Structure formats: structure tokens, C-alpha cells
Amino acid sequence: MAYPIIDTHCHLDFPKFNRDREETILRAREAGVVGIINSGISLKGNRISLELAEKHENIYATLGLSPDIEREGTDKEINAILAQIEANAGKAVGIGEAGLDFQDCKTNQERKRQTAAFKKVIELAKDLDKPLVVHARLAEAEVLKLVKDVDTIVYHCYSGSIETMREIVDMGYYISLATLVCFSEHHQVLAETVPLENLLLETDSPFLSSRKGRNEPAFIVDSVPVIAQLKDMDPTEVAKMTTENARRAFNI
């Protein structure tokens, strides 16, 4: 069944979609996806995200800085991306993804470098008055301490603890659950617990597919019946509420 729904986070700019990007967008529309938020994480990715948003009326761009670039990139590369975000923020619905990934940071030096770059993105989001899409892996609580002055925060692909999730929700921020919820017990517990008014849905395509192989925005519909069952709700109501949340969070 098709539900009108928004995929709040995907990466259609990635090479995995090079051979069938337009067909992928069409499949999403046919599946009932009424909006796609494409998250840039690099100079090139941000540029393609803006191009996709310009070309398709139901695709929106967020402009970000990958935690990998925050950790490994040169100052020149990081500053170029920050300048790009600032220059094009008017065409974007949010800033990010950006954040902390302590799974990949092996040293204190790497953590410090990543945190310093992330703080610059936070300041941009505040100055530009845009929602901030955060990537937080094994660093959910650390990110929360840094972002508490930003009005709208979306915890993209949240995988942390129930306790930190409650703190995030208490601050009025959003928890975005990926299609992982279709097969991950931990994410099903998160889905059961998160208040519906704080919940967003995403695919994080091309990753975390609910089906075999590459994920894509059309597969967001797989999450709806799973969450509806966990929350003992009608699937249509879950789709409606999470779509309204997405429109409110990103002002679309």
C-alpha cells in the first residue's frame, strides 16, 4: 500500500545511483513518497544535492560536512565546504549531515579535530537559522551537549541508547529512524519508545536496505507498517504524522 510519506535522509548524489538516478526518483514517487531530503556531505555531494533540488520539485537539499572529512580533511577542504554551505544556504532546507563519529576516531587528536570542525557547522546552523542534521555514532550524548543552543536538531539514523533518546526528545528535537527498523531489534525498541511527534523516517539510501541490495527512497514505505504495529496504530496515521513532522522540522 502507498502512503504519502517523506524520506528525510538519503544520498542520491552517491555513485551507486549514477546508472539509474532518475528511475530511482520515479520509483519513489510511484511508491507514495511525496518528498525526498538529499543530504550532501562533501563539496561535490552538496553541489549535486542542490542540482537535484533545483531539477525536482519534491527533492530538497541539506548541505553538510562528513565526519570523515571533519576528521581527515585538510583545513583548506573543510573551509571550502563551510564557505559553500554558507553561500548556498538559501537554497537548502537544512545544514548537515555533520557530527561526531567516535566509531572511526581512533585517537584523541582525531576526536578533537572532528569536534572542532563540527562546532563550526553548529555555528553556521545557528547563524543561518536552519535545522541541523546530526550524525552521531557512539557519540550521541557528546553531540547533544554541543548542539543545545540550536533550535531544530534532527538526529539522523539514531542508533543510541533509550536514555539519551529521551534527553533528545525532552529538548524538543527529532529522532530519525532508518529502514533498519524493519530488521533491527534495538531500532524496534527505539521506535516503540519515541513519541510520535518527535519521529522522522529515513532510508539513508544507498545504505541500510530493508530489502536485498541497495537501499532507495521508495523503500521508506517498508518502515511504516513495522512502526504502526510496534505502536499499535494505523499505518496511515504513522505516515501522516511523520510526514507532518518532516514538513515542520524542515519548513517544507
Image (cartoon, rainbow, N blue to C red):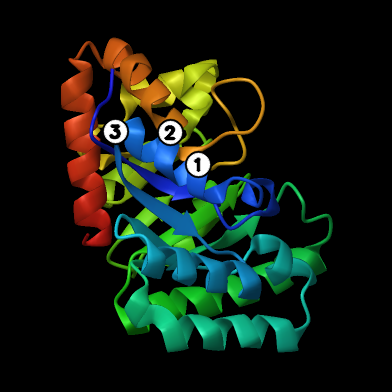
Q: CA distance from mark 3 to mark 1?
A: 13 Å
Which mark is first along the chain, 1 or 2?
A: 1
Relative to 134, does residue 174 appear above or below in the rendering?
above
Position in image of residue 174 (x %, y %): 32, 47
Report the residue at 77% width, 51% height from top.
104
175 or 94: nearer the eye?
94
Label 1's element? Answer: helix
Q: Is residue 233 left or right of residue 58?
A: left
- Callout 3 amino acid: Gly
Q: Pointer 2: what residue?
A: 218
Residue 69, label in figure: none
The three-letter amino acid code for the residue at tag 2 is Ala
Circle 3/circle 1 CB separation < 8 Å: no
Within 10 Å of disc 1 (Cα), the crowding (few <14, some 14-19, many 20+) is some
Residue 32, numbered circle: 3
Q: Amino acid at mark 1?
A: Thr
Q: Quadrant of residue 75?
A: bottom right
The residue singled out by tag 1 in the image is: 24
Alpha carbon separation for disc pair 3 and 2: 8 Å
